């Protein structure tokens, strides 16, 4: 039965490649509903134990909050103001875009939502700067992926939940510390890889040209959804800004309260309540409730803007992967790895494998749920340094290749290119680049393993 279900998983992945518009989470749910009862009590209710309910609530709360922010025009307002600061200095635009995209992603907008907002601005700016769409795509997608493991984003939420629920991983590493370690290392790896690729592939030569960006960029190029003409809209944005700032302060306070230093120094009840604020799902639901209660909002439009497709993909694949995990698939794969791969090269193999899978499928919906359970099993008999390296290797490997045109981020950027010839050229170059990043991910993992090993 395990062999059959594993083969069906491969079929789902191949089908998602052949038919990119198919949400792989749906057939995964169907197979889980079909086969889970055969492994459990014999009733369909056994599937409920496989469904990642905590992850679902967290994802829904966070995405709902940022859906409300987008509908208030707050995101468009901030983006327009920041971009306007660099229009007089074209050479600063690539660096500014990288920092803006990274900051927005890390703040909780997520890589997909951020690229969806930035790409309509970045690609026309690339034309004005004389930078190819290929290079601009590398830049903004690299920035989004570099910040993808912030505790406020979907990959960060998934990774943190997985580490906290895994007894072996949580024993070998401190989950609150590990969440920031993963974020910082992935940010460093992808940022350096992106900067080097951008400069090596022609970015340095293009930036040496003196091109002046016009003071006013046309409305068609900006494509902002929010228009800040009326006083009521300005008041709404100011109110949203205050609520968002307050939530950010509460979140930081919750993370600070999580340190053991405060235990015994602050009464247990207020300390535990404050620590709840470190849960991004709680912050998302609190922010959503605050914005909906304190200002008018179009509830139907907000719910439509929630990325339900992504949530279904993540939860569907996680449910099916959980079924395979309970049937012993991670143990089988980890046993094969331990017998045939030297320990020093295991992180490189994980990074390359997760990168290759991510190039053809979803990073957080497919690649992470496939490789993290295997890393969990391997970590049970591994030292803490190897366990940490495996987690970072999978995280960086899955996101180093996300400029692939087969991924959502690459596709969003290609959609902004006007000419068919340029689209085809960019598609081909992005695909080649993504495959080149697979061995790069392996090299980074090998280097990280050596660094962690030297810290023993």
Image (tube, helix red, strand yellow):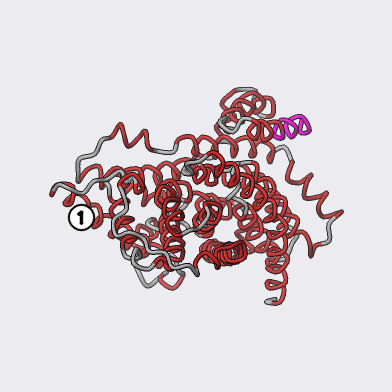
Q: Residues within 10 Å of mark 1 (few under 14, many from 20)?
A: few
Q: Quadrant of residue 350?
A: bottom right
Residue at 79 percent across and 62 percent down: it is: 345
Q: Quadrant of the C terminus?
A: bottom right
Total count of labels: 1
Q: Quadrant of residue 174?
A: bottom right
Considering depth in this image, is 99 or 299 the residue closer to the camera? 99
Indicate whether residue 9 is drawn in magenta. yes
Q: Which residue is mark 1?
A: 238
338 left or right, relative to 394: right
Indicate whether residue 385 is drawn in magenta. no
Residue 36 position within the rendered picture, expressed as x and y whole percent measured from the top left: 65, 28
Looking at the magenta stretch, what is its main secondary structure? Answer: helix
Q: Is residue 455 above or below residue 75?
A: below
Q: Quadrant of residue 31?
A: top right
Q: Is residue 215 above or below residue 281?
A: below
Give the secondary structure at mark 1: helix
422 left or right, relative to 152: right
Residue at 60 percent across and 37 percent down: it is: 317
Residue 51 position within the rendered picture, expressed as x and y whole percent measured from the top left: 55, 36
What's drawn in magenta, residue-wise? 1-10
Q: From where the camera sits, is residue 19 visible? A: yes
440 left or right, relative to 78: right
The residue most toward the right is 340
Residue 312 position within the rendered picture, expressed as x and y whole percent measured from the top left: 51, 34
Q: From where the camera sits, is residue 181 visible? A: no
Residue at 72 percent across and 54 percent down: it is: 352
């Amino acid at each position: 039965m395990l062999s059959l279900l594993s083969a069906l998983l491969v079929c789902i992945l191949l089908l998602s490649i052949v038919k990119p518009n198919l949400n792989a989470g749906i057939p995964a749910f169907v197979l889980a509903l079909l086969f889970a009862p055969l492994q459990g009590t014999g009733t369909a209710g056994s599937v409920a134990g496989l469904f990642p309910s905590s992850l679902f609530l967290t994802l829904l709360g966070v995405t709902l909050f940022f859906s409300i922010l987008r509908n208030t025009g707050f995101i468009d307002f901030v983006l327009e103001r920041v971009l306007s600061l660099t229009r007089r200095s074209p050479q600063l635009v690539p660096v500014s875009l990288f920092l803006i995209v990274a900051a927005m992603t890390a703040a909780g907008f997520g890589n997909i939502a951020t690229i969806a907002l930035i790409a309509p601005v970045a690609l026309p700016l690339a034309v004005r700067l004389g930078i190819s769409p290929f290079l601009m795509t590398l830049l903004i997608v690299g920035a989004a992926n570099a910040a993808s493991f912030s505790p406020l984003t979907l990959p960060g939420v998934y990774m943190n939940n997985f580490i906290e629920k895994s007894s072996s991983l949580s024993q070998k590493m401190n989950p609150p510390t590990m969440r920031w370690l993963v974020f910082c290392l992935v940010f460093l790896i992808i940022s350096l890889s992106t900067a080097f690729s951008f400069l090596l592939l022609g970015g340095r030569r293009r930036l040496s040209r003196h091109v002046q960006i016009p003071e006013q960029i046309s409305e068609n190029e900006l494509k902002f959804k929010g228009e800040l003409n009326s006083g009521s809209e300005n008041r709404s944005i100011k109110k949203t800004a205050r609520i968002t700032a307050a939530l950010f302060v509460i979140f930081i306070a919750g993370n600070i309260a999580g340190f053991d230093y405060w235990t015994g120094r602050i009464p247990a009840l207020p300390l535990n309540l404050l620590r709840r604020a470190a849960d991004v799902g709680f912050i998302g639901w609190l922010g959503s409730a605050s914005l909906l209660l304190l200002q008018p909002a179009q509830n139907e439009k907000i719910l439509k803007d929630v990325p339900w497709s992504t949530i279904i993909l993540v939860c569907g694949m996680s449910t099916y992967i959980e079924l395979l995990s309970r049937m012993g698939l991670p143990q089988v794969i980890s046993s094969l790895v331990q017998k045939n791969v030297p320990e020093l090269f295991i992180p490189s193999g994980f990074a390359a494998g997760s990168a290759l899978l991510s190039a053809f499928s979803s990073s957080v919906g497919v690649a992470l749920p496939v490789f993290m359970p295997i890393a969990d099993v391997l970590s049970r008999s591994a030292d803490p340094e190897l366990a940490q390296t495996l987690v970072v290797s999978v995280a960086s490997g899955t996101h180093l290749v996300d400029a692939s045109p087969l991924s959502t981020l690459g596709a969003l950027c290609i959609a902004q290119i006007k000419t068919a010839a340029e689209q085809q050229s960019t598609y081909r170059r992005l695909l080649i680049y993504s495959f080149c990043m697979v061995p790069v991910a392996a090299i980074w993992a090998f280097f990280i393993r050596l660094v962690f090993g030297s810290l023993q």
